[in-house]
Amino acid sequence: MSLTRSTSADGAILTVQIKGKFDFNLVQSFRQAYADLNDNIDKVVIDLRETDYMDSSALGMLLNMKKNLTGKVETIQISNCQPQLKKILQISRFDKKFDID
Amino acid sequence: MLNILVVDDLALNRRLLTVMLEQQGYRVYSAENGLVALNLLEEHTIDIVLLDVIMPVMDGFETAAIIKERFSQVYLPIIFITSLEDEASFERCLAVGGDDFLHKPFQEVILNAKIKAHSRIRNLSQKAREQNLQLEYHQNQVEREHEIVEHIFNNALENQQSFPKHLDFHLSPAAMFNGDMFLVAQSPLGSLYCMLGDFTGHGLAAAVGALPASRVFYTMVSKGMSVSDIAAEINSVLGKLLPGHMFCAATIIELSSTGKSISAWLGGLPDTYIINQSGEVIRTLESQHMALGILEEDEFERALIHIEVEDTCRIVMATDGIIETTSPHDEYFGEHRFKKVLASKPAISTEQVLERVNKFARGSKQQDDLSLVLLNCLPMREPEQKSEPLSALPFNFSLSLNSKQIKSTDPVLEVVDVISKVAGLNAHRANIFLILSEAYNNALDHGVLGLDSEVKNQEDGFLIYYQQREEALANLTDALIIIDIRYCPEELALYFTVCDSGNGFSKEQANQQSLAREHGRGLCLLGEVASKVTFNSAGNQVEIYYQLTASSTSSH
């Protein structure tokens, strides 16, 4: 379980990648990942390519992030979901609130 | 010491010459006719032959011809010693391979001078012969090396031909020896990864780097890892492995499974282009980083470029071969011509591009390391999921946690890992995790610790909630949570029971409303993923029934 953040070469996209499980243990580091966003950033990507597990606390954290970032960035994208996690996001109607790639 | 063979039918002549030459420090062999001379030549290494012309059994002419034929690899001088004076005889001496004449009677000084001159030539010839042998040896080595390189590359490059709709590429076998490498693979999530690399160095040296780089690439793509992780890992492997002056300029691209976005790491190759339907360059992606294998791990730059693309877009990658192709007038093909060719025709193929490049180079030295990749930004077909058949054995799993264990562990993932070992359950592990996580955390947070989720609604409520949870957990005594999991092969189902020593929610009637609303998200999700969720009347035990359908992702 770990969280890494990286900014694209042009500085416009922040990518937060979560490895292993995405649950309440990440509450603090996830909150910090988008805390002091540079003004150049207009898109935040939550990259779940290496996320194997998530539960409702992860959904809560994503919603908190959306609340916090609305108006600050143009798009919040959840990308590279594994099939079962995509299903969980769909069940929770996250496809209505986020751009899920 | 020089070995000289004296051939004369007259014993007196042989004796005279022998004495004379031995005085000069030469080793002398003598023969009374050509046949004997030929035998001696087979037995000993002779450096110079002094040959009489008229002899019984085999005369000088015949002997000279045979000697020249048999000992052709290193210059073996034949000096005719003769009393013949007619031109026809001289001519014949030369025609059969004689290298010099000496008239009888001759001066000793002249004979010595001739022997020295011819032995010098023989020495040179011997050296040339040795060098030729060495050259031949090295040539064989190089050929063998090339065979090995080809073998290595063929084994290192997998599934290059597996994506004909997406990829059109050209990579000549010669390009491999120039260190060009093209790797392709699809991740479990369906995205397509391509890597075009150009190693400094040639032949085996470059292949040495291609092997580990390709292994890392395939392994990491099969795990669906990000392009920056792949670049960082190849950089570190090559950095450790290759000598300082060797590295690999590379472009690594991931096309998402929808075909709508690309992520690229660009290190040291010429510009990558995105072209539209008519072949016009709509975006140029310039190299951002140093080539792979140069920077230390902590200096490595991972930044990617992310771009949204249309399904009519194509991505053009090339090594420097194309733009550096020169015309007979020493003019570079250059980026401008390259772009013009790309736009010369819709959906141009690599073959057509290279035809134009070769036409440009006509007459000048042929370029053979032209590597070119055209990637069509189309949606990918979903990769086939291998599904393991479900076990026929009815496994049971049971775990009781006391307060000490509850405090010091986060057991959900560990339990999931154990359950997933049962054949066929691994495919369901994300759902199993979700079910257990919701049930266990519900039992712990609301049952054992008696926390109220209401706080989550406040600003930064999540953080406050989990701080409260930590405090409550630290003070916990006398608690129990029991997890029971039953796998039922006949029903293709999993039964989860989680019960806790808490008060349940019957005693918290007043809070029930907020409780139900608040952890609503978790319970609601649980209800969707599982087929049935039931609480006992006390509210401290939940039973969950999960149907193991053929595919874990199939809809409800």
Image (cartoon, coloured by chain):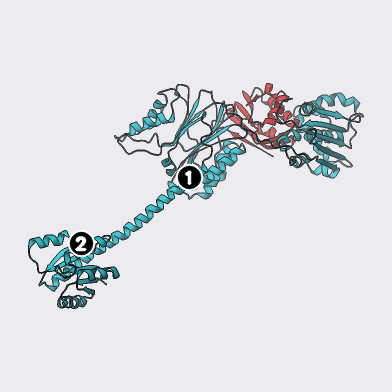
Task: Provide the residue designation for mark 1.
Answer: B247
- Secondary structure at badge 1 equals loop
Query: Looking at the rendering, in which quadrant would you find the C terminus of chain B?
Result: top right
Q: Residue at x 68, y 25 (%)?
A: A66
Disc 1 chain ID: B
Task: Provide the residue designation for mark 2.
Answer: B65
Q: Can residue B46 be seen in this view?
A: no
- For residue B127, side relative to residue B348 (left or right): left
Residue B15 or residue B181, whichever sits in front: B15
Query: Looking at the rendering, in which quadrant would you find the N terminus of chain B?
Result: bottom left
The location of residue B340, given as percent across then percent down, is 39, 26
B27 up-or-down from B453: above or below: below
Q: Residue at x 59, y 38 (%)?
A: B221
Where is residue B403, by image quadrant?
A: top right
Colour cyan belongs to chain:
B
In the drawing, what numbered circle is on residue B343?
Answer: none
Q: Residue at x 32, y 58 (%)?
A: B131
Mark 2 Cα-neighbour bin, 10 Å: few <14, some 14–19, many ≥20: some
